[in-house]
Amino acid sequence: MNTYCLAIDQGTTGTTAMIFDVTKKTIIGHSNIEFKQYYPKSSWVEHDLNEIWSTVKDSIQNLLKQYNIETKDIKCIGITNQRETTCAFNIDGKPLEKAIVWQDKRTSSFCESSKGSYQSLKEKTGLPLDPYFSGTKMKWFLENSINVSSALENNSLRFGTIDTFLLYKLTSGNSFYTEPSNASRTLLFNLKTSNWDSDLLNFFNIPKNTLPEILNTFDNFGKTKGLDFLPDGIPITCLFGDQQSALFGQACIQAGDLKCTYGTGGFLLLNTGEKIIHSQNGLLTTVAYKNKDKSVYALEGSTFIAGAAVQFLRDNLGLLDSSADIESLAKSSKEEDIEELFFFPFFTGIGSPYWKPEAKGCIYGMTRNTSKEDLSRACLEGISQSITDLVEAFESDTSSKITQIRVDGGASNNNYLMQLQSKFSNKSIIRPKVVETTALGAILGSLIGIGDIQLESVSDFWQKDMEFSEKSSSYFTKKREQWKKLTKKIFL
């Protein structure tokens, strides 16, 4: 009889359920359901937690029905999630407000006015004081939501990132936990002690009893209970922040291994082993994962908009019928027509390496002759240039030359984008056969958590699909130089 591992990949624009055949050691399939994004004010981004929970349920049911898999054969569950998005719910698991999404900038003024007093705490977190991170969002909830402040007074307030909320729901409130790859994104977590830090909690005025207990990334997080779509008793053995999960799914388990995920945003992570490296070039220090009470760390570069820039052309400007159309349109644009055309995808601010939350998106250099083909290529170039900014910051921080980057995420299926990335960065771009490495990381993590496989065997599940090693040209060198000059002129 076959047994299965279920992964729940809860992302920014949708939820994916993936099923893995433990017996055959292969992915069977996945089901994705998108959900609504809410923009109540300029620079505010929210999610309805009840809608997210519905997509979890529906994606799992659709998946199991599609592949005729019985719930009794599911051996374990792994969860991976959008990280800094912040949830406030009560002791019964009911949301108190819509979740504040990682892209949300409502706490910008607090961050700007408090940077001086926070500076002494920065080494503890490895993070800048920025609206991106969860601690600022929790503080905002406490100061601006009557529902949240009332729950605090009644001792029924629960704060958490999405992993904690889903775990709480899956276990009918029996499990209130998180783990370091998520906790290290809150501004409340001490990298050295691997726990909530009293100085940081005091700085943001967050009561410790509102926060989940921190376990290992691969651990016993509890069992399903009281659900109408899964039976009681399925062990949940992995929680994983999405970018660290993708690093793990890319088999980047050795110090020096590097990956880039092209999802809603673009995220470059470098495994630094047991060494905590503090960046001098705007990168983040974070926890890659924790196994058997031993932490492995990473450097991270974050650009907040990557695949979402393509969605902007599709949904806001109506230039594309589907996101996949951008590849053929972009390829038909001529270099001589777009030498001075630049697409800066900074719709929700600039992350690494500059950290300018107030920045806005910009299309620079349009003429009457600019076509949708030109805008399509400029969009893909803008994504590639943003990622190349991160690559150069990594090389500066580590004083070593990067030669190759493992890539994943939905947009990595765009061959032309990968070619442009290779040309702008002068690196070999390597795509695996399984590009859903975020969900794969949660699967492998849950199998480690339940004791089916060892950490060292993760590499056995990775296979190369295609390598892009493109020769650059004067066009790309010139545009790279112009990009840097314009970035400083417009945004810095």
Image: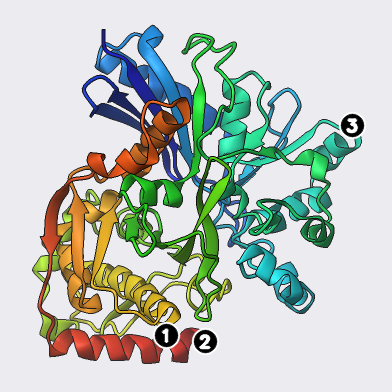
Rounded to the nearest angstrom, the CA distance separating label 1 from label 3 is: 49 Å
Q: Mark 1 = which residue?
A: 487
Say which residue appears at 28% left-offset and 82% top-offset. Answer: 366
- From what the image shows, is residue 293 above or below residue 129? above
- From what the image shows, is residue 164 above or below residue 431? above
Q: Is residue 36 visible?
A: no
Nearest to N terminus: mark 1 or mark 2: 1
Residue 370 lies, in percent from the top left, at: 21, 77
Q: Which corner quadrant of the image does residue 374 belong to?
A: bottom left
Q: Mark 3 = which residue?
A: 154
Left or right: 366 in relation to 208: left
Furthest residue in direction right, as rendered: 153
Q: Mark 2 = which residue?
A: 492
Nearest to N terminus: mark 3 or mark 2: 3
Rounded to the nearest angstrom, the CA distance separating label 3 from label 2 is: 45 Å
Confirm or deny contact between disc 1 and disc 3 (CB under 8 A): no
Residue 399 lies, in percent from the top left, at: 39, 82
Residue type highlighted by circle 3: Asn
Depth check, front residue: 2 or 101: 2
Residue type highlighted by circle 1: Thr
